[in-house]
Image (cartoon, rainbow, N blue to C red):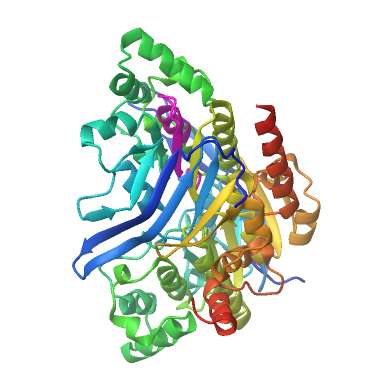
Amino acid sequence: MTDYVVEGRGITRDYVTSGGLFGAAKTVRALKGIDFAVERGKTLAVVGESGCGKSTLARIITLIDPATSGQLLIEGKPVDIAKGGLTREMRSAVQIVFQNPYGSLNPRQKVGEVLTEPLRLRGGVPSADRRRRAMAMLERVGLKPEHYNRFPHMFSGGQRQRIAIARALMLNPALLVLDEPVSALDLSVQAQVLNLLKDLQDEFGLTYVFISHDLSVVRYLADRVMVLWNGTVVEEGTRDALFSAPQHDYTRKLFAATPEADLDAIRARVERRRLERTAG
Amino acid sequence: MASTSSPAEGPLLDIRNLRVAFDTAAGPFLAVDGIDVQVSPREVLAIVGESGSGKSVSMLAVMGLLPGSATVTADAMTFDGRDLMAMTPAQKRTIIGRDIAMIFQEPMASLNPSFTVGFQIEEVLRQHLGLKGRAARARAVELLTQVGIPEPESRLASYPHQMSGGQCQRVMIAMAIACEPRLLIADEPTTALDVTIQKQILDLLMQLQADRGMGLILITHDMGVVAETADRVVVQYRGRKMEEADVLTLFERPSTAYTRALLAALPENATGDRLPTVDELMAADNRTEGAR
């Protein structure tokens, strides 16, 4: 049997919005029955534009928000945060890295505290051990031991995202949810962080759910790709199948909208512009 | 240099040796260090660089939008032959916002949340063209139609928070083209938007540029956007110009290590299992060619 780290069956999520003083409350169904499964050590990319439900899905997988209906299995065990009964071990199995490293780190917490806090909250690790592990993790993500006593504002965006990744890895999770982890970063820094994520996956046998709207990044990192549109899965498949022959109209539209630095395309466009000029 | 515009026309915007320094607690910091920018009428110039390359600061200097801690110097800064540096602030205001307009990265943050979009568009028309009342309203409807907002009459009464990011950016573009500018500066106009919306906004900008014969300066860090829009490209790194070329030459035969590194770091250009990073490539290049 295939070893799935996370599985979702018919996941739905409703948001109830207040209709104001006189209006009736409205229900928005953000996810309309999502099925997915991610194999151990693999990366599932979830692709779609704002409002498609991809961040809602991230919050459900990370056990931040409950699903309205459907079943979520982590390491084969059903989990439902609405019912409770979750152990700390089950919660530490899933960690998340958010899009904006400027917002996801507490500005008044030193890096050392950022990294040791998860261990302290879970308990069972003596203080000296926590410090030693945090130092080791800092080095592992490409930072230096002397960064331990610094505040987040002293770091660049790429370094902050490394800190957020280090924090997520402190509890040895099986699954890392990456919610647009490189979209706030410069191209060169993006390449460094993507390389780091690949190395860490190999080293720790991590499973990734990678949420993104950037198809070129997805192509680089994903094993399987799931395309979400308006709360439903319109297409799911291996990266190679999906990129070589996208089936659904919406997937094709996404591909067509992604700018490409292709020489033939540039040549054709320059020629078109030249003709327009001489005609005009 | 192979230029796509006819040689008889002088540049629309001509900046020579622009330097911008910021006063900081640690002494002056040179954000822009000797940049030249020339844009011809009807030309699309892309300025490319990463954060800290000074690409936004140099255009904010032209617009006069930098804070008091900035010191701007240049050998020349002219628009359509007129010296921008010799102008009084009042004279400059007749050009800035009218003949030169700018749109920004965060449409939600650049619109005033307390006023309707109709009010904000009409304010531009009132300020620069003296249009009032029904005439201003009619022109605002016309502008919203041009930027592709459905039901423009009723949308005029909307507040920015009632619109999506893409629609807000369309409103920003409507405000920018309200006075038929001859030069539009777009600072990362699509960075905050989804790819499908990005495509719509870029298509709109390119269509407006072609229809109106505007000069367009597009500030971006996205080489894909450059490939799909620019006639000519300036690559900046740490406040300096690294390279300037027409778009095809830049992608075909990039002449500096930095541009080569930027292109190689695109995930779609990944050949092996790892992406080459800019630092690695610059270091490798310095070893072979000698440091810049």
Quick check: is B148 in the magenta stretch? no
Q: Of all residues shown, which one is farthest toward the top? A: B134
Q: Percent x, y for residue A42?
A: 67, 70
Image vertical order of residue B224 relative to residue B208, above or below = below
Q: Image check: B83 left or right of A236?
A: left
Q: Which residue is rendered at x = 54% and y = 25% of the image? A: B148
In the rendered view of the protein, which quadrant contains the C terminus of chain A? Answer: top right
Q: Image check: A164 left or right of A148?
A: right
The front one of A123 and B227 is B227
The front one of A30 and B99 is B99
Q: Percent x, y for residue B284?
A: 58, 81
Image vertical order of residue B72 relative to residue A160, above or below = above
Image vertical order of residue B285 relative to residue B17, above or below = below
The front one of A136 and B283 is B283
Q: Image check: B60 left or right of B182?
A: left
Q: Is residue B156 visible?
A: yes
Q: Percent x, y for residue A261?
A: 66, 54
Q: Quadrant of residue A71?
A: bottom right
Range covered by the magenta-colored residues: B168-191
Q: Is residue A45 visible?
A: no
Q: Which residue is rendered at x = 38% and y = 75% of the image? A: A118
Q: Quadrant of residue A166?
A: bottom left
Q: Image check: A103 left or right of A207?
A: left
In the rendered view of the protein, which quadrant contains the N terminus of chain A? Answer: bottom right
Q: How many marks?
A: 0
Quick check: is B177 in the magenta stretch? yes
Image vertical order of residue A106 relative to residue A53, above or below = below
Q: Which residue is rendered at x = 76% and y = 60% of the image? A: A238
The front one of A199 and A46 is A199
Q: Percent x, y for residue B25?
A: 18, 67
Q: Of all residues shown, which one is farthest toward the front? A: B8
